[in-house]
Image (spheres, rainbow, N blue to C red):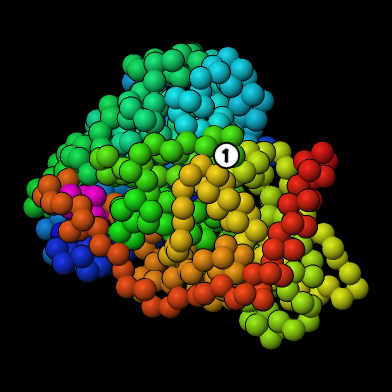
């Protein structure tokens, strides 16, 4: 048996998987985000810990024999978050999260002070990344920075609590702006640019490698026969890729979660930082990946649902019955920059907008505009990947938004490629983490373990819709410069 635990922004999910890769049980515990000031997004690390304990406690109660047989644990989780520890390993302040935009000014300062940043890390400085957060702390909370002995990412802090060891793996480390992504090692120059050294960083391992053994008292708590080893694990998207079997160069998926991601596996380091493409290490040795990221994908639909007082399912149902109201590409346009944008603009300050509203604009047409706006932002991601030399010919679709056939159909026509809905695309990083746990335990060939799920439905581009969306995309792109000046 193997246990995968995913530490998301909104919940912690634990998944128990057997030797045949069947899911035996799962448990999830919700989390809340604190926003103490505009643009700030924080969580208390202890909230992750308590949620994880509760989730695994539930599994132990519901599946005691399965928990007893767990041999290894894999962790995945939200990337980029900064957990600051003093010399005694005590948390100094709430963790600053991936969707926190307070460090915009520090990003400019970091690139100015370390011009080689993009060449070394493969990425531009963005407020979501970890390094600018430390510059912000040094400037605004100097007493905290002075006491900071170690910086850990969220799942590395959980590993520290589980094992007593400070270890991180490559895919998550690549999102800090402190890793030489091509060399898969910490960059002394990048660390120095933020006033840190290797002494502040955890030890690095590959995601499929053993990375500590769980404390015996926790194994006793959950009735485990022996304290399991932990795998290196993965950042959330790399873990999702492992769960989907996206471990061959060229394999791709679109994630319609809170944020939107276009993920492509590569066999080498292929950066395109000027278009805000993320070039990270994959969770397996010898592999990298690229990502285009839009910060508000399903989050845009959730926001629109809250504004209209409808749930998301009702909005989508209304849309299905109102498709003839306005020709495709001629109705309202929505720019989904509710929390700023990453690819291709790298603009944490820009905010979203509706445009081209008319007397005919109703709730259904504006719902469609939200779905189309996210699709346009994903097309921006695709074109940025293409500009870096990557070819994407088809992709799987995962995340909560994948439940909407209407949304996938829009995406297929905007992206001009076949998109596939999967038999089981909702387990996210936890399933990939469980697979990495198995690899750390057995040393098997990843190709034998990380197989793809069955595709159950394929959405092909509609030629007429693709033509209409090309005109809509041009209008969408023309609006960004005006929004950026506001």
Image quarter hosting the N terminus = bottom left
Q: Position of residue 455 (x, y in %)?
A: 36, 73
Q: Quadrant of the C terminus?
A: top right
Residue 237, image x and y in percent?
41, 50
The answer to whether residue 200 is above or below residue 1 is above
- Residue at image position (38%, 78%) is 456
**263 to the left or right of 27:** right
> Which residue is located at x 62 percent, y 61 percent?
375
From the top left corner, tell me how far across and down residue 327 is, in percent.
77, 77
Residue 91 placement, left or right of 107? left
Q: Is residue 286 magenta?
A: no
Give x and y (percent) for residue 89: 34, 25
Q: Does residue 435 belong to the magenta stretch?
A: yes
Whether residue 435 can be seen here: yes
Left-right relation of 474 to 296: right
In which image quadrant can residue 46 be found? top left
What residue is pinned by disc 1? 276
Q: Main secondary structure of the magenta part?
A: helix
Please give the range of residues in magenta: 434-439
Residue 100, compared with residue 433, is above or below; it is above
């Amino acid at each position: 048996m193997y246990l995968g635990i995913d530490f998301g922004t909104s919940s912690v999910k634990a998944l128990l998987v057997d030797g045949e890769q069947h899911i035996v049980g799962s448990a999830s515990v919700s989390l809340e985000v604190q926003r103490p000031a505009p643009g700030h997004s924080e969580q208390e690390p202890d909230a992750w810990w308590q949620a994880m304990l509760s989730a695994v406690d539930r599994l132990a109660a519901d599946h005691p024999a399965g928990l007893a047989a767990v041999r290894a644990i894999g962790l995945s989780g939200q990337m980029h978050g900064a957990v600051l520890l003093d010399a005694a390993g005590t948390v100094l302040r709430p963790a600053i999260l991936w969707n926190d935009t307070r460090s915009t000014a520090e990003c400019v300062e970091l690139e100015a002070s370390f011009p080689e940043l993009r060449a070394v890390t493969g990425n531009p400085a963005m407020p979501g990344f970890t390094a600018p957060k430390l510059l912000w702390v040094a400037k605004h909370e100097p007493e905290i920075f002075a006491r900071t002995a170690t910086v850990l990412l969220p799942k590395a802090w959980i590993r520290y609590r589980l094992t007593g060891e400070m270890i991180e793996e490559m895919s998550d480390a690549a999102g800090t702006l402190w890793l030489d992504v091509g060399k898969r090692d910490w960059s002394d120059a990048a660390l120095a640019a933020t006033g840190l050294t290797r002494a502040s960083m955890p030890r690095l391992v590959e995601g499929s490698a053993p990375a500590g053994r769980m404390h015996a008292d926790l194994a006793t708590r959950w009735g485990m026969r022996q304290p399991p080893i932990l795998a290196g694990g993965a950042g959330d998207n790399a873990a999702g890729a492992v769960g989907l079997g996206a471990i061959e160069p060229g394999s791709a998926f679109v994630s319609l979660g809170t944020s939107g991601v276009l993920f492509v596996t590569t066999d080498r380091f292929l950066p395109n930082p000027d278009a805000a493409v993320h070039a990270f290490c994959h969770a397996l040795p010898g592999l990298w990946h690229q990502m285009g990221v839009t910060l508000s994908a399903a989050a845009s639909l959730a926001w629109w649902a809250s504004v209209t007082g409808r749930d998301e399912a009702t909005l989508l149902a209304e849309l299905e019955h109102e498709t003839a109201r306005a020709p495709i590409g001629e109705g309202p346009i929505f720019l989904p920059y509710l929390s700023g944008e990453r690819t291709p603009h790298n603009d944490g300050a820009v905010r979203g907008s509706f445009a081209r509203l008319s007397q005919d604009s109703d709730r259904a047409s504006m719902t469609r505009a939200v779905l189309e706006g996210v699709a346009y932002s994903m097309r921006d991601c695709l074109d940025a990947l293409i500009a870096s030399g990557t070819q994407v010919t088809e992709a799987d679709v995962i995340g909560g938004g994948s439940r909407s056939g209407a949304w996938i159909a829009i995406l297929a026509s905007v992206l001009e490629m076949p998109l596939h809905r999967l038999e089981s695309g909702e387990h996210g990083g936890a399933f990939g983490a469980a697979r990495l746990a198995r690899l750390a335990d057995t040393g098997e060939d990843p190709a034998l373990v990380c197989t793809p799920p069955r595709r159950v439905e394929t959405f092909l581009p509609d030629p007429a819709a693709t033509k209409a969306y090309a005109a809509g995309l041009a209008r969408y792109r023309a609006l960004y410069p005006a929004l950026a000046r506001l």
